[in-house]
Structure formats: C-alpha cells, structure tokens
C-alpha cells in the first residue's frame, strides 16, 4: 500500500512518463484488440467520463490534461498495488486477484471510501519497483486507488450504462 510522500513521488513519475510520450509497459499482457461488443463498452465508458467533464472528443488539449490527471491517479491519497508470485499460474491467479480487488472496493465502499481500479497504476512498473520492495519473483498485475470522493466533481457522477442480464446470462430451463 502506497501513501504519503512515496505515493506522491510515484504519481509524479507516472504522470511524467505519459507527458514524455512513453509507451506503457505493464508486466502483464494487456489486450491489443477487443472483440466488438467489449470495444464498444470500453469506448462508451471513456466517452461518458469525458462527457461528464464537458470535454468534447475533438478537444485534444483537455483530453491530454485528463489523461495526465489519470496517470496522476486522480490525486488519490492511497494506492494498493497487487502483485502475483511468478511461480503461480497467472491465469488461475487472476481469479484471486479479481476477487481481492473487488472485495477491497466493496469494503471501502461500506466505509464511505471511494475506489477506482486502475490499469494506469501499473503502466510504468519501473517507478513502482524503485519505491516499493517488490522482489523479482513477483509480477506487478494491477492497482487500485482509494480516497474520499469529491462528490462535487462531475467525473464522480458520470452515468453508467450496464449490459442487460440477457446479454450476460444464458438462461437454460
Ligand atoms: C482492470 C481494470 C482497469 C481499469 N483501469 C482504469 C484506468 O486506468 N483509469 C480509469 O480511469 N479507469 C479504469 N478502470 C475503470 C474504473 O475502475 C471503473 O470501473 C469505471 O470508471 C466504471 O465505474 P463503475 O465500476 O463504478 O461503474 C479500470 C477498470 C478495470 C476493471
């Protein structure tokens, strides 16, 4: 768990990497392409976030500033970085990582603390490895940030679209 000055150093280095135009280099393989339905949802949520902040698609400057904020982890005061032992099967370990990530988010929510799971926390793992005692036998997988949400900030109120149950479930009787 990263807080205080160590987190501040990380947030600045992470943001600087994106400003400098570095390509993200996460330690787990990120999808290079998405199936149509997933790509549509991915684009839709991004669009909703930008719309909530009144940022038009063609407004490159504001979008750039938003991505810089994102790599600054939206100035959250706490980040949790989840790593996995390299000797484990990554596919199977992902079940545990998904479970623990969501459990942390739900436990935080129950205490009035907001959370955001963020791939942007692990795009430049060398910054994390400089600050955290992550040994070579561990792979950096994902991070999430925690904090008391600023309810007045429009990004915290963007409207969500959820896939219908019928899209997600095959009903067999
Ligand atoms: C694996 C994963 C990585 C994500 N990475 C980011 C990220 O880097 N930046 C971001 O703003 N949101 C990211 N998100 C999306 C947010 O965590 C959140 O799910 C999204 O804003 C939708 O909010 P909701 O889950 O409250 O509906 C990611 C979500 C997941 C599951």
Image (spheres, helix red, strand yellow):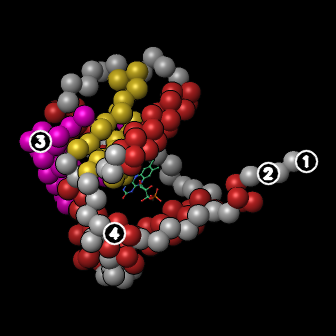
Q: Residue 11's spot in the image, x, y percent?
A: 18, 49
Q: Which mark is residue 173?
A: 1
Return the residue at label 3. Answer: 4
Is 75 situated above or below 107?
below
Q: Earlier in the sequence, mark 4 or mark 2?
A: 4
Mark 4 neighbour density, 10 Å: few (under 14) some (14–19) many (20 or more): some
Residue 60: which numbered mark, if any? none
Instruction: Determine the secondary structure under disc 3.
Output: helix
Q: Mark 4 sits on what residue?
A: 155
Marks 1 and 4, how far apart in space?
Answer: 42 Å
* Residue at the outermost left position: 5
How far apart are labels 3 and 1 at the CA level? 54 Å
Q: Residue at x 47, y 71 (%)?
A: 159
- Give how far apart the Cα atoms at labels 3 and 2 are: 47 Å
Q: Nearer the viewer, mark 3 or mark 1?
A: 1
Mark 3, residues whose alpha carbon is within 10 Å: few (<14), some, or many (≥20)?
Answer: few
Q: Residues within 10 Å of mark 2 (few under 14, many from 20)?
A: few
Q: Quadrant of residue 82?
A: top left
Query: Is there a contact, CB below 8 Å, between mark 1 and mark 2?
Result: no
Q: For mark 1, does the 10 Å Cα neighbourhood hold few (<14), some (14 to 19), or many (20 or more) residues?
A: few
Q: Which residues are magenta?
A: 1-28
Element under disc 1: loop
């Amino acid at each position: 768990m990263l807080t205080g000055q160590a987190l501040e150093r990380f947030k600045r280095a992470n943001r600087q990497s994106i400003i400098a135009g570095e390509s993200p280099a996460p330690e787990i393989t990120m999808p290079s392409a998405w199936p149509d339905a997933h790509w549509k949802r991915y684009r839709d949520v991004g669009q909703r976030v930008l719309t909530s902040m009144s940022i038009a698609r063609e407004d490159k400057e504001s979008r750039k500033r938003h991505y810089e904020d994102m790599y600054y982890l939206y100035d959250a005061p706490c980040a949790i970085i989840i790593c996995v032992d390299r000797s484990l099967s990554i596919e199977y370990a992902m079940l545990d990582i998904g479970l623990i990530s969501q459990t942390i988010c739900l436990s935080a929510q129950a205490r009035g603390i907001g959370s955001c799971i963020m791939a942007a926390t692990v795009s430049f793992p060398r910054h994390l490895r400089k600050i955290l005692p992550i040994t070579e036998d561990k792979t950096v997988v994902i991070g999430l940030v925690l904090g008391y949400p600023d309810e007045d900030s429009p990004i915290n109120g963007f409207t969500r679209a959820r896939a219908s149950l019928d899209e997600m479930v095959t009903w067999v009787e």
